[in-house]
Image: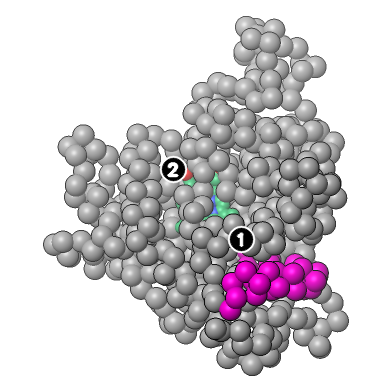
Amino acid sequence: KGSKCVGDDSRFLDQFLPCSSSLSLPGPPGHFLIGNMMELKHDHLPIHLTNLAQRYGSIYRLKCGTTTMVVLNSSEVIREALVKKWCDFAGRPISYTGNIVSGGGCNISLGDYTEKWKAQHRLVHSSLQRCCKKSLHDVIERQALHLLKVLMGYKGRAVDLSEDFTVAASNVITTLAFGIEYDKSSSELQELHRCLNEIVALWGSAWISALDSFPLLRKLPNPVFAHLLKEVVRRDEIIGRHLNNYKSQDKKNQDVITGSLLQGLDNQNTEDKALLTDIHVHMATVDLLIGGTETTAAWLNWMVAFLLHRPEVQELVYEELCTVLEGRYPKYSDRHRLPVLCSLISEVLRLRPVAPLAVPHRAIRDSSIAGYFIPKNTVIIPNLFGAHHDPEVWPDPYSFKPERFLNEGGGSGGGSTRDLIPFGGGARLCLGESVAKMELFLFSAYLLRDFQFLLPESETSLPDLRGVASVVLKIKSYDVVARPRPVTNP
Ligand code: HEM
C-alpha cells in the first residue's frame, strides 16, 4: 500500500494500489520495441549504469523488449533488496542460453531459487567449508610460495603477470576441488582456462544474448552459438573425467570437494534423493572453477596496477609487514595487526569489485525497494561498482585512497568497510567469499613482503585503470618489474 510503481508492468496493479504514474520508477526513455537495449551495449556497462544513476537516482528502470530491469546503485538499496528482503529477490532470470551453459539451470550461480537449488547450495556450502577448514590456509600458502618462486625466476625482467596470477588462483581451487595442482605449462590447465574463459566471454556477447531476446533468431545459423556449444561439450569432458576418478572410488576421498560432494549424494536422505544427481555435482564444480579463478586473478592484477600509480602506498605496506611480522611470512590470523595492508585490500575491492554487476537477480514475488513497487519476475541488477562510487558515501569516489579505511569511525576519509559489498549479500552471497578473502590477504602479503613492483624503464605510461568490463572486470594487460626485496627471513 502506498508504494510507487515500476513502469508498464505495474499498470495492472495500478487499479488496486494508490500509485500515480508520476511516482513510476525513473529511467531513460527508449525505443518502443527494443526499449533501452542500446543502453546495455555500452563498452563499460558498470560505468555507464553509474553515470545514469547521477541522472535517475540510486534506483531506476531499464526496459529490454518485454523485460523490465531495475538497476540498484547504492549500498542502501542493494542491501534492502539482497539482504533485508532476500527471500523476495533470491531468484535468477531464466534464459535459453543460460540454461545451455548451466546444464539446464543445474548450477549454483545461474540456477533459480528452487528446492533443488537449496539442496545443492547446502551440499556445496558444507563440502566447501569442510575442505577449507582442513586445508585452505596450507593450500594458499603453498601457491603463494610457488608464485614468489616464479616471480624470482623473472630476475627483474618486465613481464605481464596475469597468467601467473591465474595459475595461482586456479591451483587453489583445483587443489580443493580435485586434489590437483597444475604447472603453468600443463596442457590440461591451459585447455580448461581457455574453455571456461571462452564460455564466459561468448555467453556475454551480443550474438548470444540476442537469442534470449529474439527467439526467432534461434532458427538461423549462428557460428558464435555453435562455438559456444562446442566449448560447453569440451568443458564437460574435462570436468567429467575428474569426477569419474572419484566416482569409481568405493570410499570417496572427502578431503577434496568433489569427493565430498559425491559422498554427500550417496548419503542423501530419501527425501532429498530425488533432488540431486551427478549433474548437480558436475555443475557445482564448474561454478567453483569459474568463480574461483578469474575473480581472484583479476583482483591481484588490479592491486599491482594501483600500487604502480601510488608507489608510496606500497612502501607503507612493506614497512608494516616488516615491523609486524619481523621477517616471517604472515598467517591469515595476522590480518588484525596489519591495518595498512587491509586498507589496501578494501580500497582495491571498492574501486574494482571484480564482479561489478554481481549476477542478475529476479523477484520471485511482488515486493518493493525504496518504496517502489517491484512486481514478480522483475530482473534486478545490483550495480556494485555504482555503490562503491556513490559520492554520498565515498568522498572523491574515483581516487585510489586506501587511507580512507584507516580513518574509519570518525576520520575524514568517508565510507567504511560496512559500506563495501563486493561479494553481494543474502541468499546469493558469493559462495567463495571466505576463500577469496583469505586468498587476497595471503597472496598480497606474500607478494608485497618479497617484491617491490615497479614500472618498467621502457614504459612511458602507467597501466590504464579503466578496465574492460564483462562478467568480470579486468585490467588491460600491462608489464611490470617485480624487484626482489632484501632477504628478511629470520
Ligand atoms: C557469486 C564476487 C571469488 C564462487 C558471486 C557474486 C559476486 C561475487 C558479486 C554474485 C552475488 C549475487 O548474485 O548477488 C566475488 C569476488 C571474488 C569472488 C569479488 C574475489 C575477489 C569467488 C571464489 C569462488 C566464488 C574464490 C569459489 C571458490 C561464487 C559462486 C557464486 C558467486 C559459486 C554464485 C552464488 C549464487 O548464485 O548463489 N561472487 N567472488 N567466488 N561466487 Fe564469487
224 relative position to 54: left or right: left
Q: Is residue 325 magenta?
A: yes
71 relative position to 249: left or right: right
Residue wearing tag 1: 337
Looking at the image, is 18 positioned above or below residue 302? Answer: above
- Give the colouring mode of the picture: one colour
> Can you name the residue that lies furthest to the left here?
250
The mark closer to the camera, 2 or 1, is 1
Q: Secondary structure at mark 1?
A: helix
Q: Would the CB of label 2 be found within 8 Å of ligand 1?
A: yes
As shown in the figure, which amino acid type bears the numbered disc 2? Gly
Q: Is residue 457 magenta?
A: no
Pick the front one: 13 or 230: 13
> Where in the figure is residue 353, as x and y percent of width and height?
66, 54
Q: Secondary structure at mark 2?
A: loop
Looking at the image, is 286 positioned above or below residue 141? Answer: above
Residue wearing tag 2: 111
As shown in the figure, which amino acid type bears the numbered disc 1? Arg
Q: Quadrant of the C terminus?
A: bottom right
Residue visible at 44% across and 43% down in the picture: 111
Span highlighted in magenta in the image: 299-327
Q: Earlier in the sequence, mark 2 or mark 1?
A: 2
> Where in the figure is residue 39, as x and y percent of width and height?
75, 44
Confirm whether residue 43 shows in the render. Answer: no
Q: Quadrant of the N terminus?
A: top right
Confirm whether residue 145 shows in the render. Answer: yes
Residue visible at 84% across and 47% down in the picture: 412
> Where in the figure is residue 467, as x and y percent of width and height?
73, 63
